[in-house]
Image (spheres, rainbow, N blue to C red):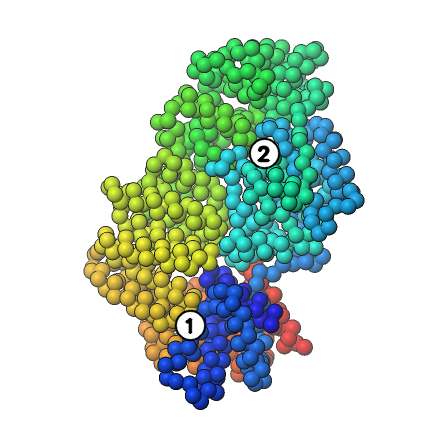
Amino acid sequence: MGMALSAVGTVVSGALSGAGGEAGRRTSERLYDLLSRGRRAGADAEANSGPGEGGSRHPTLPVTEDAQTAAARQLLELARSSPEFAREVTEWVREASWLSPRTVPAVAHAASRPQMLPPATPVFTDRAEVLAWLRGLLDEEGRTPGAPAIAVLTGPGGIGKTAAVVRCAFELMDRFPDGVLFADLAGASDGTALRPSDVLARFLERLGVPAAMVPGDEARQRDLYLDCTAGRRMIVVLDNARGDAQVIPLLPASPECLVLVTSRYRQGLLVSRHGARPHALGPLSTEDAVTLIRRVAGSGRPAAPDAVVQAVAQGTGGIPLALCTTGAGLAVREHLTWERVARQLSDRSHGHDLGGALMGEPAPDASADPVRAVQDVSYGQLAPDCAAFYRAIAVWPWPTVTVLCAAQAAGVSEDEARALLERLARVHLLEEVGEERYRFHDLTRAHAHGLAEAEDGHGRMAAAVRRVAVAHLRFAAGLDFRVMPLRWRLGPAYQALTVPEHRDPEDGKRALADLRAERENLAAVIRAAAHHGFDDLVWQLCEAMWGLHLLLGFHAQWIDTHLLGVEAARRGAEEFGDPRAVGRMWTQLAFAHMGAGQVTEAADALTQARAADRACGHHRGEATAVEALGLLRLRQWEFGAAQRCFEEAQEILRRIGPGEDGAEDVPRATALLAHHIGRAQTKRGDFAAAIARLNDALARFRRLPGGGDAYNAGRVYMSLGDAHLDAGDAEQARVCLDEAVKAMTEAGAGLQLADAVEARARCHRRSDRPAEETEDLRTAAVSYEEHGNHIGLARVRARLAELAA
C-alpha cells in the first residue's frame, strides 16, 4: 500500500506541474487507464448497476490525500483480481518510482559532494575564538539528538561575519566529507531577501537532482531537500539572513550536519525551537586591526610609525570592512600616505566635510559609523569618472554587477566599464565574485546609492535603470528566441530576429545556459523597471523569460515577476501601450501556477487572459489562452473538456484573416491543436477518430513553410504510437515509432529521440521481442547519458538488468 500510495502521489504531482516530461505524461495516463479498467471491471460485476452510473467509470485526477489513498486501494484491488493485472500494476509502480526525484546516498560512487564555499580572504585576521567556539559546539556532549548543530553569528554590517564563517568552514571541512552548501540570502532588506524556494532549487541541483525534476512548490522542495541531506555529513552556510523564516526551510535533516548562519538580526525561533547557539561578533582589537590593515596595504609601502598606523586602525573602529577598504586604498595609491589617511579619518570623525558626500550637510559621527567615514574618505579619493561610475552602478541592488549592467548604468562603453570595475575592486569598493562579475557589500552599495540620490537625483538614476533594462531586454530576447524560435511573440525586441539557415543543434542549449546564468539579475531588472514605472519594459522582460521558466522552472520567481508583468501590462493598456500584452502576461502566469501545482490559480489566470484578449480583439492570444486551458484539463484527466477547449481554440483561429495579427502563425497553431485533439480522443477511447486527427496533424506539420516541422512531426508519430498501443495494435505502434525515431534524429532532438527509442522498446516488450527491446534500450541509454538525463539513464539500465537476469 505504501509503495502504491507513494507512486500515485508522485505521478499526480508531476501531472499537474509537467515534471518528468513525456515520461511523466505517459505514466500519468497509464494510471488513468488502470483506474478506468478497474472501474469498468467493478461496474460489470454489479448486475444491478443502473445506466445513470456510467459517468463514474471515468476517474478524475486524485489531487487530495484521500483521493490518492482511494486510488492506491483501487490499484491493489485490481492487482488481486488477476495475474495479468498484478503484472501491469507492479510494472506501473516501478515505472512511477523513477519519476520521483531520486536522492543519491552520500556513500555512493556517483554521489554529489557540492563545494559551494566562496574563496576565503587571504588577509583574514584572528577570529580564533569563533573557531574554538564552533569546535566546542560540535564536540559538546548532550547535543539535541536527531538535529544538526546550528551556529548563528550575529553582528552589524561590515563586522566580518561572512569572512569568519567561510574561514571556519574551510578549517572544519575535514569533519564534513559530503560537501558544503553556501547561499547568500541577501537579507539586508525585505526587497532583496531571497525566497527559500529559490535557494532550495539551487541546493537540490547541486545535490544531484536534475533541474527538470526539482518540484515547483516549496513544500515538496523542502521534503526532497530533507531526503537529499539525510545521512550526510555536510556544512550548510546561510549567509546574511533576514529572519528565521528564510533559514528554517533550509535546515538539513542529518544530525551529522553543521549549519552556519550569519545575520544582523537575532534569530529567535532558531534558538528557541531548533537549538541554535548564538554568538555575537565584535570589532577587532587594536592589535588585530593593525595586523589586518598592514596585510591589506602590503609591504611595498614606505614604513610608517606604529602610532600613525594605530591611529588609522582606530579610525576604522576595528571593523574589518572599513579596515580592508582603507588598506586597499593605501595599497593602490602610492602617493597616499598613512599620515594623510589618519588625518582624513580624524577630520571625518570630528564632522569636517571632506567635500565628498552630503551636499553641505553635517557629516555623521565617524565613531558611530566608522564604515561610512572610511567610505567617504575612499570616495573622495576617486577620480571624477570613477566616482560617477560608482554612483551609477548602485542605482539598484543588482545581485551581481556585470560588464553589461555597469556599462549601461553609467552610459559608458563596455571596455571603459571593465576598467572602472577593476579600479573599484582594487580599492575594495567592489568584490569580484566571478569572471567579469562583481558585487557590492550591501553597506557599500547603500553608501553609493545615497551619493547617487544626493548628487545625481532621481531623473538620472531612473535613466540609468532604463538603459540597463533595455539592454537586458535585448539580451534576454535574443537568447529566448534561440531557445524557442518558433513560438509567437508580441514584444518589439523580437521583430528583427531570425533563425540562421544552418543552425547548430546545440545552440538552443547554450542560449538556455546563458539565460540561466543571468536569471537572478533579470528578475532584479524587472523589479527595478517596475519600481520606476517602465511598464513597457516590464512585460516585455517577462515575455523574454518564457523559455527559461518553461524549461527550468524557478516557479517562485516566475510568479513574482509575472505578477508585476500583469500589472505593468494593465497600466500600459489603460494608456497607450499594447493591450494584447495583458492576455499574454496572464497566460504566462498561468503556466507558472501550473508548474507550481496551483490548478485553481492557473485556471483563474487563463480566464483573465481570455477575457483580456477578447476585449481587445486579439484572436491569437485568446486561442492560446483557450489552448492552455485545454492542456490543463488534459493534465487533470478531463479529456472531454480538453477536447472542447482545443476545438474552440481552432474556431477562434479561423477568425484571423489573411494579413491580420497572428495570421502567419495560424498554420502551425492549427497543427498543434489537431495534435492535442488527437491525444484527447485517444484517452477517451475513440481510437479511429484519434488516429485520423493525428494523421491530419502530421500532414499539417509537413506542409509548414521551410520544409516542415520535423520535431513536431516526430511528436505526432509518438502520439500515433500511443494511440495504436492503447488500441492493442503493438505492431502498428512500432511502425509509427520507427518514424518518430527518424524525425527526432532529423531534428537533432537528442532527449526526445531517447524517449522515442524507449517507447519503441515497450512495443517490443508487448510483442515479446527481448533482443530488439534490449537493442533499443541500449540506444536510449547512450542518448540519455550524452544529454545528462540521469533519471532516464537509471530507468533504462534497470530494465536492461531485468532482461539480462
Where, by quadrant of the figure, is residue 793 drawn? bottom right
Q: Could you tell me which quadrant the N terminus lies in?
A: bottom right
Label 2: state its secondary structure. loop
Q: Nearer the viewer, mark 2 or mark 1?
A: 2
Q: Could you tell me which quadrant the C terminus lies in?
A: bottom right
Residue 260's spot in the image, x, y percent?
66, 40
Q: Residues within 10 Å of mark 2 (few under 14, many from 20)?
A: some
Residue 251's spot in the image, x, y percent?
62, 47
User: Quick one: which residue is furthest to the bottom in this view?
Assistant: 47
In 3D space, how far apart are the residues under numbered discs 2 and 1 (Cα atoms)?
56 Å
Residue 321's spot in the image, x, y percent?
60, 26
Q: Residues within 10 Å of mark 1 (few under 14, many from 20)?
A: many
Observer-nearest of 325 and 360: 360
User: Does 274 sit above or below residue 461?
Assistant: below
Residue at 61 percent across and 69 percent down: it is 2
Q: Which residue is mark 1?
A: 719
User: Does 757 sit above or below residue 187?
Assistant: below
Observer-nearest of 406 and 95: 95
Q: Which residue is mark 2?
A: 265
Residue at 48 percent across and 65 percent down: it is 63
Q: Earlier in the sequence, mark 2 or mark 1?
A: 2
Label 1: state its secondary structure. helix
Q: Is residue 533 left or right of residue 25?
A: left
Q: Is residue 364 left or right of residue 709?
A: right
Instruction: Give amino acid for label 2.
Output: Tyr
Circle number at residue 481? none
Q: Is residue 538 left or right of residue 35?
A: left
Residue at 23 percent across and 64 percent down: it is 654
Instruction: Give amino acid for label 1.
Output: Ser
